Amino acid sequence: MEKTVSDPGRRPDLEWLKALAALEVVVCHSDLAVKHFSGTLIAQSWYLPLSGIGVEVFFVVSGYLICLRAPAYASALAFLRARLLRLMPLYALFTALAVAARLINPAWAWNRWDVSAGTIIGSFLILPQPHYPIVGVGWSLEHEVIFYGLVALLILATRLAGEAPVWFGLALFGLGWCGALVGIAPSDAAWYLHPVSVLMTGFAAGWLYRCHEVDGRLGVAWLLMACLAVTVTLSLGTDPANTERSLRLTGASALVILFVALRDTILRLPFADRILLPLGLATYSIYLSHWFTMSALGKAVGRLPLPESAQLPVRLAVIAVAVAVGLLVYRLLERPLDRWLRAGVPIGQAFRQPFRRRRTIGPELPPNAGIAHPIGAHE
């Protein structure tokens, strides 16, 4: 496999995918806004089989993007350093916020996490745990970190030379198939079983599709389709939870592949870029902050004497507020943190100019810096 990769700059198609996936996750969790006064819940409706499919889209996009960017790193250590510097600062801030909320009011514990050194340390470091982390949505990041670790081992062992990336994609599919057959729950398995999870098939699909783009041969494309067919076939003999997850991952893989393959046509849609590109850039902030926002607003709304008919407008209003808060977190925290920690901008300057658009002070991130993590994080 060719090791060098051309610089495609910012990829609007990938930002659009991230934006749509983040919006789906926010909609999925919008029951938090109405559950205190309404019995009309997404979690109990026809939408349940698709609820949260945005997370599966994130995993597929992650596999594609990391395969796209991995050849640019000089070493496995450089790759891991870039990934962890991007993920951990903002995640640690939200974890600290959740811990502080628990100390203020024990009833504000997300998923009733246990107050133990293991849970607290593991949550701050995004380590796999046998239960949900303090910031509940962080369960998906635990699988991301495992994927990054496997990619780092690949870089260390092979330097991405020859057919190693293709074999790596097949190995990821194999891990996912083992997890599906054994029946390991993707979001609540013992920590040492996290690498053997059906979720690995999502990373594998995105990774192999990028291998196909670089290689240019139809053989890799046929290999990818065969792997997806095996995933669907195996899902027929697994437990219901993994059957559903396998089918959703296969559907998410098809969606991402189709979107990327047809990006030249899709990106001609008028006005969509003005809406979806900013949301795509802020996806990580939206993903981490939306639960806090919606939960707080839902508790406040629940104190009002609202009729059942108010659930839809309340849901839409809280979704809008959650997205707006996420955009604000991106401008005030995520972007300045990235400028400071990875672009080398002095901390005072990095946090003093979050809303400036044209004029910048100090070094900037490279033009392709906005697309290497599926949940809004920049490369």
Image (spheres, rainbow, N blue to C red):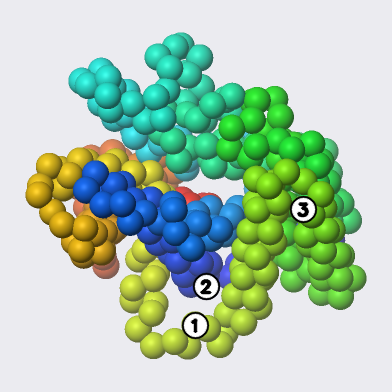
Q: Which residue in the structure is indicated by mark 3?
A: 235
Q: Residue at x 64, y 30 (%)?
A: 189
Picture residue at 35% right of the left edge, 83% below the top: 271
Q: Position of residue 216 (x, y in %)?
A: 82, 74
Q: Residue at x 44, y 59 (%)?
A: 45
Mark 3 or 1, closer to the camera: 3
Q: Secondary structure at mark 3?
A: helix
Please indicate whether residue 45 sits to the left or right of residue 208 in the image. Answer: left
Q: Quick one: label 3, few (<14), some, or many (20+) residues within 10 Å?
A: many
Q: Residue 86: percent from the left, percent from the top?
A: 47, 42
Amino acid under disc 1:
Leu
* Vertical relation: 13 (above or below) 244: below
Q: Which mark is residue 13?
A: 2
Residue 156: name its quadrant: top right
Is residue 28 rendered to the left or right of residue 185?
A: left
Q: Secondary structure at mark 1?
A: loop
Answer yes or no: do the residues labelled 2 and 1 have beta carbons within 8 Å?
Answer: yes
Mark linked to residue 267: 1
Q: Residue at x 59, y 24 (%)?
A: 130
